[in-house]
Image: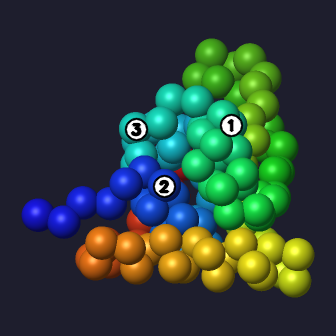
């Protein structure tokens, strides 16, 4: 069985237009501190800057809460890093996995 590293899985998800949050970071990738890991596994090694969008909501008990949603902007500034992310996916003959859609 061919497995992806977390770094490769995050790259594939972001390149496909996925948006990362605390909830889907844990559900899909087993990452409990997504804010630290996107910096360590994506932004620093590839030289990209992820877009951060502040989200707001309420808990099931009615109290106000906020979180960040991370996405990859396909722009000129990130172009070199995006190319490197795509190259990361070709390492070790990684098989493509089904695109995940964030349901959170």
Q: Mark 1 or mark 3, which is nearer the start of the sequence?
A: 3
The front one of 63 and 89 is 89
Q: What is the CA distance from the residue labelled 3 to the residue labelled 1?
A: 13 Å
**How many numbered marks does the figure carry?**
3
| Residue 81, image x, y percentages | 71, 72
- Labels 3 & 2 near each other (Cβ < 8 A): no
83 versus 59 height, above or below = below
Instruction: Give the label on residue 30, or none.
Output: 3
Q: Quadrant of the N terminus?
A: bottom left
The front one of 15 and 7 is 7
- Secondary structure beneath dot 1 equals helix
Quarter of the figure with residue 74: bottom right
- For the point 58% across and 72% down, which residue is it? 85
Q: In the rendered image, which residue does mark 1 sit on?
A: 35
Quarter of the figure with residue 34: top right
Instruction: Report the side of 76 relative to 81 (left or right).
Output: right
3 versus 44 height, above or below = below
- For the point 59% across and 23% down, which residue is it? 60
Q: What is the CA distance from the residue labelled 3 to the residue labelled 2?
A: 12 Å
Q: In the rendered image, which residue does mark 2 sit on?
A: 7
Instruction: Report the side of 72 relative to 89 (left or right).
Output: right
Instruction: Report the side of 103 relative to 51 (left or right).
Output: left
| Residue 38, image x, y percentages | 64, 46
10 versus 73 height, above or below = above
Q: Residues within 10 Å of mark 1 (few under 14, many from 20)?
A: some
- Labels 2 & 1 near each other (Cβ < 8 A): no
Q: Nearer the viewer, mark 2 or mark 1?
A: 2
């Amino acid at each position: 069985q061919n497995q992806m590293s977390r770094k490769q899985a995050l790259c594939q998800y972001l390149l496909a237009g996925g948006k990362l949050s605390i909830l889907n970071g844990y559900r899909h990738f087993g990452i409990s501190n997504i804010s630290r890991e996107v910096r360590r596994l994506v932004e620093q090694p590839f030289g990209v800057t992820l877009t951060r969008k502040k989200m707001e909501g309420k808990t099931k008990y009615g109290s106000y809460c906020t979180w960040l949603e991370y996405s990859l902007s396909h722009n000129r500034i990130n172009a070199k890093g995006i190319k490197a992310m795509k190259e990361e996916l070709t390492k070790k003959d990684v098989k493509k996995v089904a695109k995940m859609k964030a349901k959170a």
